[in-house]
């Protein structure tokens, strides 16, 4: 949560307060919480916001404060249980789709990024990707749903969902989908299809570090499938690019010895 976000939410809250004739006490509480955030006193800010909610302000005020608390608890205090509770309150109590979607997205990200609870992140991103009418970020939600399936070790289903991402033809997520399809096949020990998908990814990727990392995976897949010459060639091609050259040298030496042994 950036200072810009804090300021925006503060402006919204104060607008609602002044426009609806709320007491100066509530006004001062919100100012005080905002000042604590600027001073990086996040626990104190959260405590003030929690006390404001106990006073049962208007529904619009509660939505903004619950969202602020959800961000404070997740970003600064690492209390993901409380964060999810506040975001879920918005989803359950608000009839505004914008706030529901924003809160569901936050919940999905917490389950995926922070808690590694992929079954739960699947459920959240499934709702978002199937939202009616379709959301502007549908491609992103479909992609995050596919990754949740992949991380939940449902590899065949993940391949199907990643194909759905590719069909959406969103440049950013469709390109990444080829990479993760490669991973899904790799985890299935289907080396040939893994290599095929990573080559599709390399045809579209332009970032040097991602290209190097993917070539390392291709080399590893060739090595796992006992195609030692192909593995050697790929490892050698990234010798001067891979962050840890000793790893590549060790792989090359091992492959060289194995190839010599085969010829004996």
Image: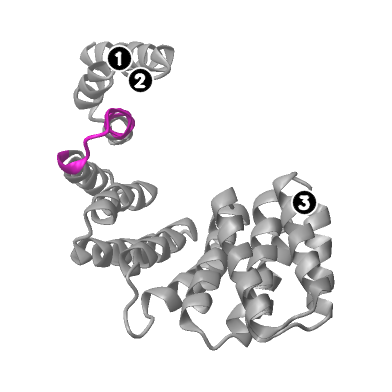
Q: Is residue 159 above or below residue 200?
A: below
Bounds of the magenta span?
203-216
Q: Is residue 81 left or right of residue 187?
A: right
Q: Which residue is mark 1?
A: 239
Mark 2 or mark 3, earlier in chain: 3
Number of the label disc, if any, that sits on residue 242: 2
Label 3's element?
helix
Q: CA distance from mark 3 to mark 1?
A: 51 Å
Residue 67, position in %: x, y?
63, 68
Compared to 184, does 199 lie above or below? above
| CA–CA distance in space, label 2 to label 3 | 45 Å
Q: Magenta stretch containing residue 82, yes or no?
A: no
Disc 3 packing (10 Å; few <14; some 14–19; many ≥20): some
Viewer-side residue, 219 vs 59: 59
Residue at image position (22%, 44%) is 201
Task: Tell which of 213 and 229 is nearer to you.
Answer: 213
Q: Are marks 2 and 1 in contact (CB under 8 Å)?
A: yes
If the image is split into quadrants, where does the C terminus sit? top left
Which residue lies under the disc numbered 3? Answer: 36
x, y percent for residue 61: 67, 78
Mark 2 element type: loop
| Mark positioned earlier in the residue sequence (3 or 1) | 3
* Nearer mark to the viewer, of 2 and 3: 3
**Residue 233: x, y in percent?**
20, 20
Indicate the quadrant where residue 245 lies.
top left
| Cβ atoms under marks 3 and 1 closer than 8 Å | no
């Amino acid at each position: 949560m950036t200072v810009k976000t804090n300021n925006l939410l503060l402006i919204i809250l104060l607008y609602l307060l002044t426009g609806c004739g709320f007491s100066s006490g509530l006004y001062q509480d919100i100012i005080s919480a905002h000042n604590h955030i600027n001073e990086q006193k996040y626990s104190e800010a959260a405590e003030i916001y929690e006390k404001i909610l106990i006073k049962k302000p208007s529904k619009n005020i509660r939505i903004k404060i619950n969202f602020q608390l959800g961000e404070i608890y997740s970003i600064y205090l690492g209390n993901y249980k409380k964060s999810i509770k506040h975001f879920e309150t918005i989803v359950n109590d608000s009839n505004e789709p914008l706030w529901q979607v924003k809160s569901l997205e936050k919940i999905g990200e917490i389950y995926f990024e922070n808690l590694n609870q992929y079954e739960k992140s699947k459920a959240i991103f499934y709702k978002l990707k199937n939202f009616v009418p379709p959301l502007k970020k549908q491609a992103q939600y479909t992609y995050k749903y596919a990754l949740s399936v992949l991380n939940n070790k449902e590899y065949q289903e993940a391949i199907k969902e990643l194909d759905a991402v590719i069909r959406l033809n969103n440049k950013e997520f469709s390109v990444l989908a080829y990479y993760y399809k490669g991973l899904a096949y790799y985890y299935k020990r289907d080396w040939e299809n893994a290599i095929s998908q990573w080559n599709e990814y390399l045809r579209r990727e332009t970032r040097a570090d991602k290209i190097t990392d993917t070539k390392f995976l291709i080399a590893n897949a060739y090595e796992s499938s006992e195609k030692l010459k192909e593995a050697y060639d790929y490892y050698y091609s990234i010798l001067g690019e891979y962050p840890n050259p000793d790893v590549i040298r060790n792989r090359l030496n091992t492959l060289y010895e194995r190839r010599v042994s085969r010829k004996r």
